[in-house]
Image: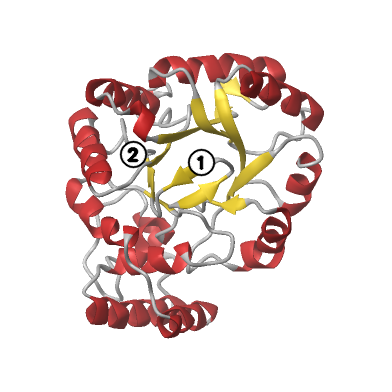
Amino acid sequence: MAKIGNLDVSRLCLGANVFGWTADRDTSFAILDGYVAAGGNFLDTADSYMWRAPGNSGGESETIIGEWMESRGNRDDLVVATKVGSLPTRPGLSAANIAAACDDSLRRLRTDRIDLYWAHKDDPDTAQEETAAAFAEFVAAGKVRELGASNFSAARLTSALATTPYVALQPHYNLMERAEFESTLAPLLAERGIACVPYYGLAKGFLTGKYRPGGDAVESVRAEGARAYLDERGEQVLAVLDRISADRGAPLGAVALAWLAEQPTVAAPIASARTAEQLDALLPVLDLELTADELAALTAAGEG
């Protein structure tokens, strides 16, 4: 288990952005059951998941998680994180919006508290003091346990920390996306004792090894973004992942996530699965610890 503020979280955070989108209710329930059975306890969703999908309006992922927790009676065993600020009908980090959005999320999640409440993105149009006061009210009421910032620059996070006790940052960070985080954000998190919970831990699926030079087309809503990594550096990373995967008998995606989990300040990388089979390829990261040589080889490959 890793620490995020006062929360104890498993080494893999299950991203729930696919629930109610590319994974229907029954499939989502099966994925959640499999994740918890393997020892996972950390779920990451948002009020905006997945409003863009045809027929959706937002909150579908939260609703599925809430129904699942109620049916399983396991709320107290889980760390549930959700976000505010990106849903078109609940935009920004104003006090009024946070108040309305938080209560909406609690209702959909069928719970009385959010363990980790993320500011989904920076809101330069709202004073950070106003956001801080709104968050503080919900923390004082016991409706929120810890606070996190998602997609904040180092400068804006530094400024926000003057008024808001964020204990975690959710940035875009993985073996293929490193420069910005490692140069600007990682030193700040280390200095302030803030945990990193990176999203796109598998580089939009590229680090699972599904995308290869001359390989068959992959049916995925993220396929185009994943193929963008298929250059010389990407091939170097895949080669090292292939070798370690063969040596350790672990799927490529689990190896890539294990590298990420071992990086300074990282508490738990986020990865999602739209099928039970995809989940099975991620779960080994819960126990997989890479050697110093394996970590160094992957780091070097990712540097190109």
The disc, 1 or 2, on the residue closer to the chain's N-terminal end is 1
Task: Tell me what residue is drawn at x 40 percent, y 18 percent.
Answer: 108
Task: Tell me what residue is drawn at x 38 percent, y 75 percent.
Answer: 290
User: Measured along the vertical axis of the image, is residue 47 above or below residue 168?
Assistant: above
Mark 2 lies on a secondary structure that is: loop
Image location of residue 209, percent across then percent down: 29, 69
Q: In the image, what residue type sits under mark 1?
A: Leu
In the image, which disc is placed on residue 7? Answer: 1
Mark 1 lies on a secondary structure that is: strand
Image location of residue 158, percent across then percent down: 78, 48
Report the side of 145 relative to 298 (left or right).
right
Q: CA distance from mark 1 to mark 2?
A: 24 Å
**Front in this rendered view, residue 230 or 50:** 50
Q: In the image, what residue type sits under mark 2?
A: Val
Image location of residue 189, percent across then percent down: 67, 56
Mark 1, Cα crowd under 10 Å, few <14 / some 14-19 / many 20+, is some
**Residue placed under numbered mark 2 in the picture:** 18
**Front in this rendered view, residue 142 or 119:** 142
Task: Tell me what residue is drawn at x 39 percent, y 43 percent.
Answer: 15
User: Measured along the vertical axis of the image, is residue 140 above or below residue 119?
Assistant: above
